[in-house]
Amino acid sequence: MTTRALQAHVRRSALWLTMPPPEVAAGADWLAPYAHDLGTRPEAGLLPTRARSRASLLTRMLAEVGQQVGLAEAVTEGVVAQDTALVFGSSRGEFRTTEELLAMMCRDDGALSPARFQASVHNHCAGQLSIACQHRGFSTSLASGLHTVAACLEEALGLLAHDSARVVVLVGDEPLPGFVSGAEPTSPARGALAFGLLLAREPADRDLAKLSLLDASRALAEPSAGPDPRWLEINPCAAGLPLLRLLHARQAGEVRLNAPGGAACSVRVEPG
Amino acid sequence: MFAPAPASPRTSILDFNVCCALGMDRESVQRRLLAGESGLAPGSRALPFRTHTGEVRDELAELPEPLGAFDTRLARLLAAAVEPLLPQLRARLQSHAPERVAMVLGSSTAGLDRTERAYAEWMRDGRLPADYSLRTQHDFSAALAVLAHLTGARGPAWVVSSACSASAQALASASRLLRSGRADLVIAGGVDALCEMTLRGFRSLGILSEQPCRPFSATRDGISMGEGAALFLLGRDEPGCATLLGFGESSDAHHMTAPHPEGRGAEAAMRQALARAALAPDAIDMINAHGTGTPLNDSAESLAVERVFGHDTPILSTKGYTGHTLGACGAIEAALTLLSMQAGVLPASLGADPVDPSLRVSVVTAARSARPRRALSNSFAFGGSNVSLVLEVGP
């Protein structure tokens, strides 16, 4: 069987985040076009009205960046369902919805809302977008703490190598519930972030970039850029920001996708 | 630039272990499975409703001292499941770099039971317990940290959390890692612990049975919940005790909690698994159904099985033995399927008798000797995720 390199062509990227203005201004100007005030909720037009009205911030963010990278079009572009795969990632998933359920359990007879229970599963957004886009192919939902972004890219590149012509990667985390973060509503610790990538096996005109996975011996060496620990403290999915910055700026480079301490995962970015 | 090894569609199962309501090791589990002994019993938690659960009633050993901060029921189940695999793993790490040994787990609850208790204390006292840690007890990644410490694996690692298809997806994901050359060995499987939220949640959906679940039965009325862990040591191109021949993964695109009524997504997953295994349907000797005991799942799954396999392939559900172990069920039931095949027995589908006459499939209602060599195992999930695995034992 033919060997395929673990690589992808980036057709589109999207980013949506909420950060207090000082955080955006402090040396991260490139984020300004993507940043929104704390408390803002994305449009998430891909979701049907009823699902959108009930959706968590996480589900809305993932749906929003999914729409921005052309998820619906990518699904219909495929000849068969498996042509387009969906990879979702979130380090903590629908934890704020889970908090609602924890509160219900402490009240009265502890009965739960069935609607909120089904919305608390980690793959809730995956299911909603599968229904919205009528996607019947492969879909997965991953979690790996500070290595969630790396895990999603690894899985996506593996799918492109052998199974799928296109992979949509949607990764995000919403702010932690107050009972665990202890953070005030206006604290930077309340920041939300999600990003999306439309990846393809074959190159095309107007690709943003080509990504190539670096093997372990190269990945262990210090890359040119890695996740900023300050951002990771706020949101684990910020591990994707170095990659997104290169895509935004159409620059070449090598970036690490996860924090030190785990199996190194780095990619080389070559602008299209 | 990274280039994967030549692709091999078959994944070697070098070793495996399972812990569930039937027992804490393969031998105990196999003995009770073949004897037709259910692990379901009245739930031990104080709840305002009746239910039966597949609770692991054996005492779970404490984690070793360095992992004290990670101590949760889920972590203890995982540690119990991996222990018999450690001698072989440590031997293999003599010739494989730790960075070439990956870990992929499936789980739906992670450390939620610990968070439930911590939250209750926070509500009562205004502060979380001093020994509660989000990162080491609640997060999905905590299980990976525990497994890494116990095994020495340092390769790519993630948790699949696609509800009830999670650990079946984990096995498929592991196969992809091997095929792409990113890992030489993968520790893959699933783990989930009982927690109050899931019991109450399924109750709120009206699909939690008060009696032991009865998959495929004319009187089935819902699920029984369970817990446990199953882990597999997977390799590439070397002989093992079994083989993962293929897998299929699809989405229903229908409803968040109900399956496609005609089982179209399930059918797609089964057909894809067979195609990847390069097998015709009549090469399958037994089907381990998802078989939850809900009216909708068992009907939809039966329709799909009938279209793919016809009426005669033996089908059974093991959830009458273990309960529905949620994210762990794909891996646990793959293990139970292998144990059945290794023993040359088709175990009874507990609770199925009398079988719903509208289901036109061949449900195994009494254990019988057979020589099943190849099996297909289904796992279907909230959100419409469907996974089918094709497994083979023997030469």
Image (cartoon, coloured by chain):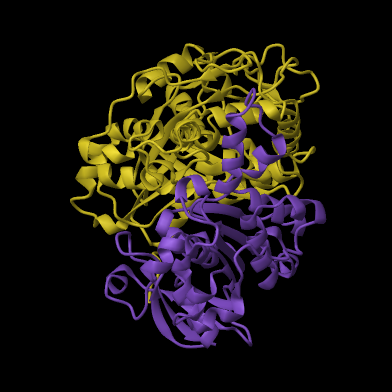
Chain colours: A purple, B yellow
**Where on the picture, by quarter, is residue A69?**
bottom right
- Looking at the rendered image, the quarter that the C terminus of chain A falls into is bottom right
Along the line of sight, which residue is nearer the eye, A138 or B162?
B162
Residue A244 shows up from this direction:
yes
Residue A125 on image: x %, y %:
65, 53
Residue B180 shows up from this direction:
no
Q: Residue, x 62% and y 61% (percent of image)? A: A85
* Residue A81 located left or right of residue B277: right
* Residue A210 located left or right of residue B153: right
Residue A140 on image: x %, y %:
57, 53
Along the line of sight, which residue is nearer the eye, B332 or A127?
A127
**Where on the picture, by quarter, is residue B28?**
top left
Residue B62 on image: x %, y %:
28, 28
Along the line of sight, which residue is nearer the eye, B277 or A61?
A61
Along the line of sight, which residue is nearer the eye, B8 or B73?
B73
Above or below: residue A223 compared with residue B146: below
Name, please, the residue furthest toward the left. B94
Above or below: residue B216 compared with residue A4: above
Above or below: residue A65 compared with residue B176: below
Q: Residue, x 71% and y 31% (percent of image)? A: B297
Q: Residue, x 61% and y 45% (percent of image)? A: A97
Residue B32 on image: x %, y %:
44, 14
Q: How many marks?
A: 0
* Residue A214 located left or right of residue B149: right
